[in-house]
Image (spheres, rainbow, N blue to C red):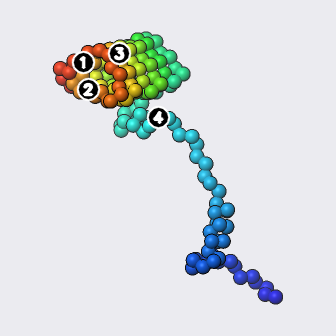
Amino acid sequence: MPVFKKKHEPNRTGKPGYQHDRERYHDQVKPKTTAPRSTLSEADTHISGTPKSIIGKTLFVKGKVFSDEEVFIEGKIEGQLNIKHRVVVGKGGIVNADIEAREVIVKGTINGNVKGNYKVEIVPDGVLNGNIVSQRVVLAEGAIFKGNIDMTLKETT
C-alpha cells in the first residue's frame, strides 16, 4: 500500500477521462451574480466632461429649472427649463414646459415649445406637442410631433 497517493491530474488528451474532468470542474465553479443594471443607457447617463442631473421617475418639479449641466428627466416637470447643455426626456418623462437648451432629445413626452441651440431630436415613440426652433432637427420614424419648425436659428455656444 503506497504511503503517498498519486494526485489526480486532468486528462487533456481527449480520451474518455476528459469529459469526467470537465464535468467535475463545472460542478465546482459557481455562477457569478451581478447587481441589476439601470434602465438608463450609457448614452443617457453621460456626456464626457459634463456632470449630470437626474429627475427620477418619482420626482415632480413645478417652476423654473436652470442648470449648467446636462439634465435627464424620467419624472414630471411643469414650468420652464433653461439648460446650458443637453436635456434628455426619458421614456417615462413628461415635461409640460418650454425648454431652451443646447440639445434636446425626446424619448418621452414634451408639451411645450423647444429651442435647441444645436439640435432637437425626437426618437421613435417620443412625443413633442409644441414648436421647435433649432438649426438641426431630427424626427425619427415613429416619432410623434405636432407643431411648427423654425430652422433659421444660428448655433450659439
Image point (65%, 56%), residue name: 30
Please tell me which of labels 4 and 3 falls first in the chain.
Answer: 4
- Judging by the rendered image, the residue that carries numbered circle 3 is 129
- Judging by the rendered image, the residue that carries numbered circle 4 is 40
Q: Amino acid at mark 2?
A: Val
What's the distance in space between the residues labelled 1 and 4, CA to CA? 29 Å
| Residue 138 x, y percent position in the rendering | 28, 28
Q: Amino acid at mark 1?
A: Ile
Q: Are marks 1 and 2 in contact (CB under 8 Å)?
A: yes
- Judging by the rendered image, the residue that carries numbered circle 1 is 149
| Residue 71 x, y percent position in the rendering | 40, 26
Image point (50%, 17%), residue name: 60
Side (left or right) of 3 relative to 122: right
Please tell me which of labels 2 and 3 falls first in the chain.
Answer: 3
**Residue 82 visible to an observer of this rendering:** no
Q: Can you tell which mark lies on residue 137?
A: 2
User: Which type of secondary structure does the marked residue at label 1 adopt?
Assistant: strand
Q: Quadrant of residue 144?
A: top left
Please tell me which of labels 1 and 2 falls first in the chain.
Answer: 2
Please tell me which of labels 3 and 1 falls first in the chain.
Answer: 3
Please tell me which of labels 1 and 4 falls first in the chain.
Answer: 4
| Residue 123 x, y percent position in the rendering | 36, 29
